[in-house]
Each structure stands twice: as structure tokens, then as C-alpha cells.
Amino acid sequence: MAIIPKNVVCPRCFSKDLYRFGKDKDGFQKYRCKKCKRQFAPDNPSFNNRSRHQRKYPDCPVCGKATFLHHDYTYYSNFRCCDKKCIHSFRVPKLINVVPPSSELKPQAFSFKGMRHPLYIVLCALNYYFCGNSTTRKVAQTLYMVHQVKVSHVTVSKWCKRFAPVFKKIAVDRLLSVNLCDSDEWHFDETYIKIAGKNYYLWLAFDAETRFVLDFHLSPDRDSNSAHSLLANCRLKFGQPSSAVVSDRYYAYQQPASLFFPRAKHIRVEDFDDPINNNNVIEAFNGQFKAWYKPKRGFNSFESANRLIATYIFFYNFIRPHSSLNGLTPAQVAGVQYSDKERRFWLLLA
């Protein structure tokens, strides 16, 4: 029986209970551990000079052993430790740019060319549609009954979509002087809507202190890519909250929350009845949004839905006063300075 040198031990479990296991590809003697079944060739220079940075995947941060790729996503990779006693799982972000959310409307030239009706009538139609939870047909009927102006519901729909980039520009200019980093908590949630008969997901970011809708993202998928787009844009525009970010227990929020808001605690709500940390403030907004959305019976196209939702959020943030905020709008509570006259006739100032 061949004698095994005393200085040869298993590099994994440090056991000396070994046996010879043939030769490796370079002709050096191999050994195999009887306990952990590890194979190694200690006389091979490549084995002695092996360092951890030569591993294909990063080392386990808990035990320092090798890892394997468990799941690979667009913006991060999930690794897991090879040691069955450790099996620690961790995420590593990828150094690639995150796609902006759908709320970032493409710049468009705007003009009043082709509009035959006074601007006051257009403003009334937009207020009826976005603040009165009316359909375009009901808006056209109200304009005829109250203002004696006869317009088609198609014209009302075109007005709502046409002014979306204008409202977007107003919101961006007004929010440059606002600091929402002082807020304690930001809430994130998603709900679904119908577009051309198919389910789409509306991702929302909400400031609990001012009731201000920070951003939104419309996506056909409920996945980690959409969560990355929304949270990355919130970090880019507003920074990060002083205390915590709150979401449900959906896994897609874990990696972007820890990546973009490292100083804030990520609270994952387990139950709607939790009296301390709950997500009810954004669920209340979802209820108001659904009350506006349901009479429309869905949207015809993605572009139409995206523009109408952007305009609805502008009216929610800047135009419609809230009784819970003492008759102010969320933008006024957040620090945006504008008068009631500006709020009523915003297009004239645009």
C-alpha cells in the first residue's frame, strides 16, 4: 500500500484520511479525501499558487468559499455559496445604465395651432376629466350643458393627450427648488390596468409626508427591471429619504432599494393591518386612481395611457386641493410656491 506523506492534508476539511486518486492532466499525483470527497494535487505549482481572485465568481462574504451563479438578471446577479452548510445568498449589481421609466416623456414641440376653442374651455375640459372622474363623452356633454360649447369627445381626448408634455415641463421646472430628502418615508407599490385588453402594471413612488407622487412607470411586466427603472429615477431626481423606504414583500424591490437608497432602511410590509409600518398611504392613492380610471374602461394604446396617467398625476400633485392637507396641494406642502390663480390658469403661464 502506498504511503501518503504526513504533510498532505485536505484543503477543504483539513482531514488526513486520504487515498491516492491517480494523476492530474499535468502528471502530478492526485489525492482524494474520504470525508468530503475533495480531489487535489498538492505537488502541482498551479494548485499551490492558486489565489481567490482567480475564481470565476466572487467569494462568499460569510465563509470566503467559492460560489455559483444562482440567478442572472438584467441589472444584477444572484450568487450562492457552494458550501451546503453555509448556502449564503447575495446579490452583485452590474455596472450598466438603467433604462429610464415611462414617465420621462419624449420632448415634443407644442403650439396652439389648429385649436378653435378658447383656452378657458380647454382648461375646463381638463379639470372635468382629471378632477371630476368623468369620461370624454361626459366632459363633452358637460361643456355643452354648462358653457354652450359643442365639441366632440374625440376632441376632448386629443386635448388631454396634447398637453401632457406641457404639464411635464411645468412640473420639472417647479421641482428644481424642492428638497424631498427631508421626508421620513417613501412608499413604493404597483397596481395593474388594462391597455387594449391586456394587463399592464403601473409602478408608483409616493412621499408619505407630503402625499406627493414622486414618479411612475408603466410596464407590461412585473419584474425587477421595472423596479430598477422607477427607483433609479427617484434617486436621480430627489435623492433619498432620511429614514426608510416602504414596499410590499415582492422580491423585485430588494436589490434596487439597497443599491439606490443605502442610507435608508428598507421596510417590507407583511400585512395591511400592521399599525406601525404600513403601505396604506399609497394604497389610498391607488383607490383614488382606480376611481378615475374605471369609468374609462381601460386605454386604447400604451402611448395614450402613459400620457393620460402623467397628466392625472400632475393634476393630483399641483392642481387639486386635498382636504387632508388643509386645502393645499401636495406640491404646495412639498415647498413649491405658486398662487391659486396660477393653479387655475396654469396653461396661460406655461
Image (spheres, rainbow, N blue to C red):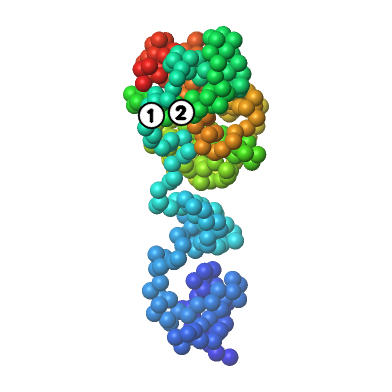
Dot label at residue 74? none
Residue drawn at the location 56% of the way across and 58% of the way down: 70
State if disc 1 and disc 2 touch (CB < 8 Å).
yes
Q: Position of residue 82 (x, y in %)?
A: 55, 62
- Label 1 environment density (alpha carbons within 10 Å; few <14, some 14–19, many ≥20): few
Dot label at residue 110? 1
Dot label at residue 162? 2
User: In terms of secondary structure, where does tag 2 sit?
Assistant: helix
Residue drawn at the location 65% of the way across and 30% of the way down: 297
Vertical arrangement, residue 59 with respect to residue 132, above or below: below
User: In terms of secondary structure, where does tag 1 sit?
Assistant: loop
Number of marks: 2
Q: Position of residue 141 (x, y in %)?
A: 60, 16
Say what amino acid the circle numbered 2 marks: Arg
> Which image quadrant for residue 168?
top left
Q: Residue furthest left?
A: 177
- The CA span between labels 2 and 1 is 8 Å
Say what amino acid the circle numbered 1 marks: Phe
Residue drawn at the location 56% of the way across and 38% of the way down: 301
The quarter of the picture where the C terminus appears is top left
Q: Position of residue 303 (x, y in %)?
A: 51, 37
Q: Earlier in the sequence, mark 2 or mark 1?
A: 1
The answer to which of 272 and 156 lies nearer the viewer is 156
Q: Residue furthest bottom?
A: 1
Q: Position of residue 332 (x, y in %)?
A: 42, 16
Vertical arrangement, residue 292 with respect to residue 103, above or below: above
Residue 25 seen in render:
yes
The quarter of the picture where the N terminus appears is bottom right
The answer to which of 178 and 297 lies nearer the viewer is 297
